[in-house]
Amino acid sequence: MARLVPVRLTVDQIRLLASALDSHIYWQLSDQQYRNDGYVLPPASNDPAMRKEIRSSLRLLARLEAIALTAAAPQAR
C-alpha cells in the first residue's frame, strides 16, 4: 500500500496542480491523434502502459478537482 504524506495546500495551489496535470495528460501522455481541442479522447495512446498512466492521472485529476470544490465551498453554519 502506498504511504500517505500530509500536505497543506491552498485551494489555488490545488487548482494549479490540477491544471498542470491536465496539461501533462494532454501534451505528454496522450498520442497526437487522440487530442481534440483541449480534450483527450479514449484510448488516448496506442501504448498500454501509457493508457494505464493516463487513467491513473485522470483519477488523480478528478480527486484534486473534487478537493478544490469542497474546500472552496462556503462552510455551513
Image (cartoon, helix red, strand yellow):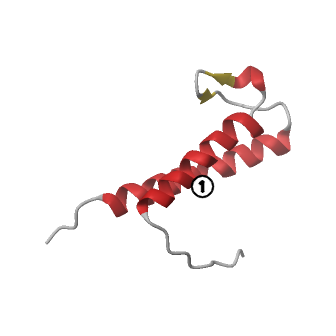
Name the residue located 58 percent from the left edge and 27 percent from the top edge.
38
Considering the image in quadrants, where does the N terminus appear?
A: bottom right
* Residue 19, position as x, y percentages in the image: 55, 46
Examine the rendered structure and indicate whether residue 46 appears above or below residue 12.
above
- For disc 1, the marked residue is 60
Residue 29: name its quadrant.
top right
Residue 33 placement, left or right of 65: right
Residue 17: name its quadrant.
bottom right
Residue 49: name its quadrant.
top right
Residue at the extreme left of the image, as rendered: 77
Residue 68 placement, left or right of 60: left
Name the residue located 58 percent from the left edge and 21 percent from the top edge.
37
Examine the rendered structure and indicate whether residue 75 appears above or below residue 34.
below
Between 21 and 41, the residue placed more toward the observer is 21
Q: Residues within 10 Å of mark 1 (few under 14, many from 20)?
A: some
Considering the image in quadrants, where does the C terminus appear?
A: bottom left
**Tag count:** 1
Q: Which amino acid does label 1 sit on?
A: Leu
Name the residue located 63 percent from the left edge and 48 percent from the top edge.
21
